[in-house]
């Protein structure tokens, strides 16, 4: 498993993730994604996109959204890279609260995210 866009974790979460063996790629370390995909050693993946991975400068997906996340372009690039590297056999787009997305920017981005998961 690879977790991309890692930021703002509390100490128990840090400990649990370290023990889990989940590969973590921070927002600033996206260059490590190709190598992480190779290390997975599987031709197929499930991709789960929590929309609060998107930086708040792009919009707010929910009440947990915070700064330091992926730009929409970075998320697009990561999903395109995943799609070129392995077969996405299933995916989910979650953690969206339209009441928090006051200007609708995140909601308008969702169809493109789903399209990238489907290819």
Image (cartoon, rainbow, N blue to C red):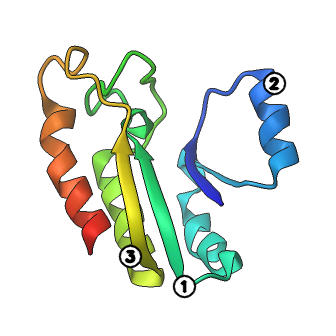
Residue denoted by label 3: 83
Sequence-first tag of 1 and 2? 2
Q: Position of residue 71 (x, y in %)?
A: 34, 44
Residue at image point 65% right, 70% down: 36
Q: Is residue 78 left or right of residue 103?
A: right
Pair 3/1: label in front: 1
Please rate how many residues cluster around mark 1, counting C-alpha atoms within 10 Å: few if below 14, some from 14 to 19, many from 20: few
Q: Is residue 119 left or right of residue 108?
A: right
Distance CA(mark 2)–CA(mark 3): 32 Å
Q: Secondary structure at mark 3?
A: helix
Sequence-first tag of 3 and 1? 1
Please rate how many residues cluster around mark 2, counting C-alpha atoms within 10 Å: few if below 14, some from 14 to 19, many from 20: few
Res 90 → quadrant? bottom left
Q: Is residue 42 left or right of residue 60?
A: right
> Nearest the camera: 66 or 31?
66
Distance CA(mark 3)–CA(mark 1): 11 Å
Residue denoted by label 2: 12
The answer to whether one can see residue 51 in this image is yes
Distance CA(mark 1)–CA(mark 2): 32 Å
Pair 1/2: label in front: 1
Sequence-first tag of 2 and 3? 2
Residue denoted by label 1: 43
Residue at image point 35% right, 27% down: 56
Q: Secondary structure at mark 2?
A: helix
Kindly indicate whether the residue at mark 2 contacts the one at mark 1 (C-beta within 8 angstroms). Answer: no
Disc ID at residue 28: none
């Amino acid at each position: 498993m690879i977790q991309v866009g890692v930021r703002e974790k509390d100490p128990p979460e840090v400990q649990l993730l370290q023990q889990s063996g989940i590969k973590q790629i921070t927002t600033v370390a996206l260059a490590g994604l190709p190598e992480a995909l190779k290390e997975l050693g599987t031709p197929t993946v499930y991709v789960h996109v929590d929309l609060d991975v998107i930086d708040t400068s792009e919009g707010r997906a929910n009440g947990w959204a915070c700064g330091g996340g992926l730009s929409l372009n970075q998320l697009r690039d990561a999903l395109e890279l995943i799609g070129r590297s392995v077969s996405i056999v299933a995916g989910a787009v979650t953690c969206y609260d339209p009441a928090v997305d006051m200007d609708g920017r995140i909601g308008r981005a969702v169809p493109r995210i789903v399209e990238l998961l489907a290819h």
